[in-house]
Amino acid sequence: MSAAVGTLGSALSLLATTVFQSDSAVGGTFGHVTPTVIRQLPAETDHFIGRWELVKHIRRLVRGPGLPQGWRRRSRRRGAGPPGRLRVVMLWGRGGVGKTALAVRLAHELARDFPDGQMYVDLRGASGSTPRAPADILALLLRDLGVDPGAIPEHVDDRTRLFRSRTAGLRLLIVLDNARDEAQVRPLLPGASTSLVIVTSRPRLSGIEGGTSFELSVLEHDHAVELLGSLAGFARVAAEPAAASHIVHACGLLPLAVRIAGARLAGRPGWSLENFALRLATQHRRLEELRAGSLDVRTSITVGYTAQPAVNQRAFLLLALCNAPTFTVLPLQAAMDCTRAQAERSMDELAEAQMLEWLGHNAAGESVYRYHDLVRDYAAELLAGGGTGTEDHRAELGRVIGHCLHLADRAERRLTPGSHRQVARFPRWSASPEDSGPDTEPDVLQQLASEYEFLLCTVREALDAGMTTAASELASLLAAYQDTRALWSDWERTQRPVLEACRADGDELGVAVSLRDLAVLRRLQGRLSEAEQHGLDALAIFGRAGRPADTADCLSNLGWLYRVRGERDQARAYLARALAVSEECGIQRTRGWVLQMRADLEIDAGALDTALALLHQSREVFEAIGERRGLGWTLRITGDAYREQEQYDRALAQYEAAADLLRTHDDRRGVARILDAIGALYQCMGQAQDAMRYYEDSLAAFRQLGDLQWQAYTLGALADLYTGVDETAKADSCRTEAAALLTGLTGSEARAQPARRL
């Protein structure tokens, strides 16, 4: 609609039907003409939806506080306008958001308040053609105001002075549509406060004095559906509400896109909305679908893109390399291989031009940006047209991946101190120390959390680009973070395609790494048979490759798996092998965890003094290497040992200390396990109500985490407690749910976990 109204308004401003009268009593340099009628406003759209509250608000501001009727009554008296009245209204926002439609609607609503005329000019600041020069626009306005063309000065400053003289005391409403910047607008503003100027632009014109800006965003969902219905037919939209919702979301709730979708449906009454929604669901053809006559979303976006300098055009494309929902300056800096200041400048200018949206700051203090959905489609289209397989784009994507690997490396070192570090197989990228950005370097885990979604997208893009080694490394580095935060669905979504790609490429080492990480995930999920097979397969490959550190990790995970299944002899054997390898290779973190696991086995066997001695060794290892999360888990198991010894106060103290440590690491699964352990403690003490409370809290946490295995164990414990207090119905419900969960996981209702755990 904006483009259509702008074109119409431009024609009207050039062919305005202005009537002039001669007055022989007045002479002078500029001749004698007095305008009596200036009515240049374009017609209002029939489909104006979703902006009425803003229209009312601006109308109140324009008329001034408490003076709307009085202002109209005095509307033919020359002189100053009412005090407190708005003089310049600036409407800004991305192309297609409906700025022109709103400006025209406002102008018609306020026309009676400005009886000396309503003028309209398309400044062509974002039309794809050359923006109109202020001098040319002033000449047009002066002619419309009755100045003889031969009397119009040559210089723009002289024209501005004449324009302000001619408009002094007049009550004019002037719409300056499609402005490029402040320099284009400033000479066109009347000097007196009796007139109102409505300016539309894509960037915010912060340098205009005496004006108030209003940013136009996309429509709300219900308003977008209403707009679609006003064009395609309300009954038709009401008959397919889900499809209508999909359509407006595919349009990004952008008024221009929704208008085009509605127009296309109106012209094809035989189409179902569901069919059209499916057509719009495909990213690479969405922009092609959003064309109707002279209305074209792609053209609207192209205007903004081509107006940018070459460096910003390049930045705009490179931000689409990973097709991420949001991004910070850091990936762009890597892609462009430039300074942070250069990357920030490009992103700021793109945001100012409405090619990007600024969303605020993330937890690490970085500015976060996004494309509007249709703008993202456009960027992806241009990127594909330029050939993402070219060496330039591969190099740029490689640097982005290198940045992500560098960040994930640093985060993994924080999460897993004392681990063995393998030689990197894909080059890292990092900014020079002199170009480190903010004065205070953000915490690396906070930075990883803020960039996490981008890193997941980077794994996918690396796979799509055939950079399997890079994808494998990044997915594996993210596993420690995903384990700590219990992000199991993400873990699954990253590792499975990486495993398939490594197999397809014949990358045996990549296959082993993925199998090892998936084996841990499957154990945590309670899918123990899969975990065992993945672990044994990875162990065989690492053995052939001579990688003892990875071998120790596989052995320890298998040992813990067998312990969960109740196969204690097998568990002891694998944990003994893991301990021997970790001690031989000096892998302290693995050693600390294996000591902890062996202690758990001793608790199961009732050898509590032996268990406490092993836990003491584990604690010393973790304290020496700064592994706070591992220390938290060791303290929890120490609490289990004291609980078995009926030293309940000491057990509770260990649990509370463990919880404090694990909360600082945002280890939600670890904290949930501690809640369970405290529930078991109170159960042993005969305090059934306290036990129920802790079990119920832990069950809620396991549900939130999606930990089906521990949901089943906790439900079983609750069933026993409910039975003890004669709440049979609750007990039966818990047992039924627990059995269903265990059957889904293992094919059996039997609980493999040793009873003392709860």
Image (cartoon, rainbow, N blue to C red):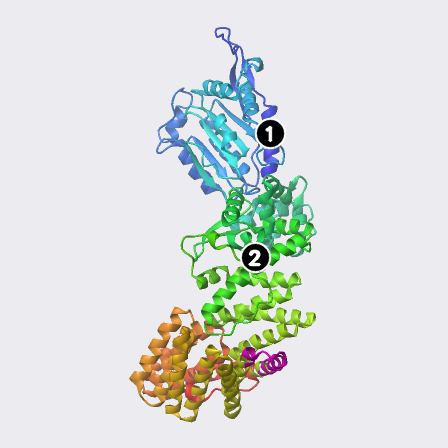
Q: Label 1, secondary structure: give it.
A: helix
Residue visible at 55% across and 87% down?
748
Which sits in the foreground, 722 or 365? 365
| 756 sits to left or right of 565 | left
Q: Please, what is the three-letter code of the amino acid marked with disc 2? A: Ala
| 157 sits to left or right of 309 | left
Q: Main secondary structure of the magenta part?
A: helix
Quadrant of the rendered image containing residue 661 = bottom left
> Which contiguous range is marked in magenta?
532-551
- In the rendering, at what x and y percent does residue 749 appear? 53, 87
Magenta stretch: includes residue 539: yes
Point out the residue furthest to the left here: 649
Q: Please, what is the three-letter code of the amino acid marked with disc 1? A: Ser
Which sits in the foreground, 220 or 635? 635
- In the rendering, at what x and y percent does residue 121 appear? 56, 28
The residue labelled by disc 1 is 10
Residue 714 image label: none
Gap between marks 2 and 1, in whole Å? Answer: 39 Å
The residue labelled by disc 2 is 324
Q: Measured along the vertical axis of the image, is residue 428 above or below residue 674? A: above
